[in-house]
Image (cartoon, grey):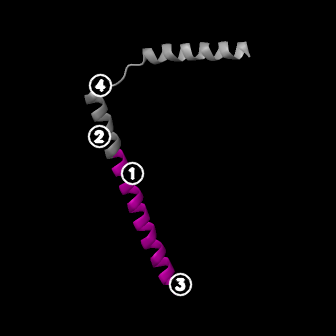
Amino acid sequence: MMAQIQKTRQFTLESWAEIQKVTWPDYPQLKNATLVIIVFVILVSMVIWLMDLSLRTIIGWVMGLFGA
């Protein structure tokens, strides 16, 4: 039991030391990254919407050929 507590304590101390090394982004970097992600999500959404629209049209056309 004592060994497990010691391992947990050591892990916590090492984790805290690693967190201290992290360089957090400043506000302009954060704003820029957020803008890039929003634009990317909008573009991917548009591509998926266009694919859905075109496949729906093609499937409707094919189904119309066979009288369905």
Q: Earlier in the sequence, mark 4 or mark 3?
A: 4
Residue occupied by mark 3: 66
Question: What's the residue type where badge 4 is placed?
Answer: Asp
Residue occupied by mark 1: 44
Tell me how far mark 1 sits from mark 3, CA to CA.
33 Å
Residue 41: image location, x then y, percent: 37, 48
Residue 35: image location, x then y, percent: 29, 40
Residue occupied by mark 4: 26
Residue 47 located within the stretch drawn in magenta: yes
Q: Earlier in the sequence, mark 2 or mark 1?
A: 2
Q: Please identify, in this view, whether the residue under mark 2 or under mark 3 is nearer the observer.
A: 2
Furthest toward the front, the residue is 1
Label 3: element kind? loop
Tell me how far mark 1 sits from mark 4, CA to CA.
27 Å
Q: Please identify, in this view, whether the residue under mark 2 or under mark 1 is nearer the observer.
A: 2
- Name the residue rendered at 63%, 17% in the picture: 8
Q: Please identify, in this view, whether the residue under mark 4 or under mark 3 is nearer the observer.
A: 4
Tell me how far mark 2 sits from mark 1, CA to CA.
14 Å
Label the magenta part by its dominant secondary structure. helix
Task: Say few, some or many: other residues with alpha carbon within 10 Å of mark 3 (under 14 / 14 to 19 / 20 or more).
Answer: few
Tell me how far mark 2 sits from mark 3, CA to CA.
47 Å
